[in-house]
Image (cartoon, grey):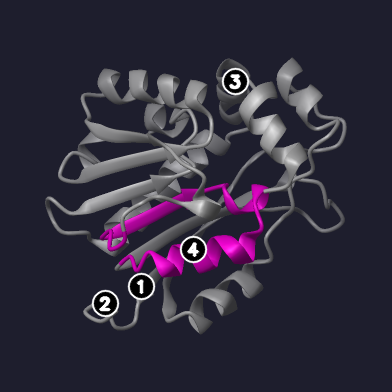
Amino acid sequence: MDLSLRLAWTQIVTGKDYDEHMSGIGQAQAAATLTRQIIQSAEPPEGGRVVIAGAGTGQMLDFLDAALLRPFRMTCTDLNRGFLARLEERIVRHGLSATILQDDIEHTALEPGPDLLFATLLLEHIDWRRGVEVFAGLRPAACGIIIQENPTGMTSVVTPGRRIPPSIAKAVEIAHPTLVPIEELLADFERRGYKCRARNAHEVADGKRLIGALFMRETPGQD
């Protein structure tokens, strides 16, 4: 993650503004739908370990049936301790339990071998190829990735001209996330031994859509 993006996500963007923005443009709702589809397709075992990297404030949980997550041992991480405090409140409110960790996914301290490793709108904010390398290095049985896809001609992650909450407006003055090309993402995972087994899309505001992809390890029993 470059220094400007790190500053934006650790010192500028507030959890309140992030929640307002993500639900206002329909991305929190879309992420919840895609998360449900990925979990149902991956079928992690009851009691299995599900890791959500870059979990942020967990605003997606407001639009997801919590019963879907209760069978699993959850771990949620993020760079921003303030976001994690907001996430922890949500976890409790929805009757869930999770281990909450402050973690930098590019230099992660996560234990390897989760049954499902999840990242929603995380790769846009880091070196995404390094992110795929880290995910594969953790040797999950399955990896669920949600990315943003823009309409043709729109290259910025935040829609030009859209009214956005103050802290996010301040952040985008200095920080510039980068869209992840879906076909390159699929190819990079495949090179690392992960095949795409399911792929879905959900329309959101401004002609964009979120794409959810489930990658399964081809030889889950081997290191």
**Local secondary structure at mark 2:** loop
Residue 163 relative to residue 200: left or right: right
Q: Which residue is mark 3?
A: 20
Q: Which residue is mark 2?
A: 220
Residue 132 sits inside the magenta stretch: yes
Name the front one of labels 2 and 4.
4
Q: Who is closer to the viewer here, 135 or 67?
A: 135
Residue 186 sits inside the magenta stretch: no
Asked if the residue at tag 3 contacts the one at tag 2, i.e. Cβ–Cβ closer than 8 Å, the answer is no
Asked if the residue at tag 4 contacts the one at tag 2, i.e. Cβ–Cβ closer than 8 Å, the answer is no
**Local secondary structure at mark 4:** helix
Q: Which residue is mark 1?
A: 216
Residue 112 relative to residue 186: left or right: left
Q: Distance between the Cα atoms at labels 2 and 4?
A: 16 Å
**Would residue 65 be visible to someone looking at this image?**
no
- x then y, percent, for residue 148: 64, 51
In the displayed structure, 121 sits above or below 20; it is below
Name the front one of labels 4 and 1.
4
Q: Who is closer to the viewer here, 65 or 164?
A: 164
- x then y, percent, for residue 37: 36, 54
Amino acid at pointer 4: Val
Asked if the residue at tag 3 contacts the one at tag 1, i.e. Cβ–Cβ closer than 8 Å, the answer is no
Q: Which residue is mark 4?
A: 134
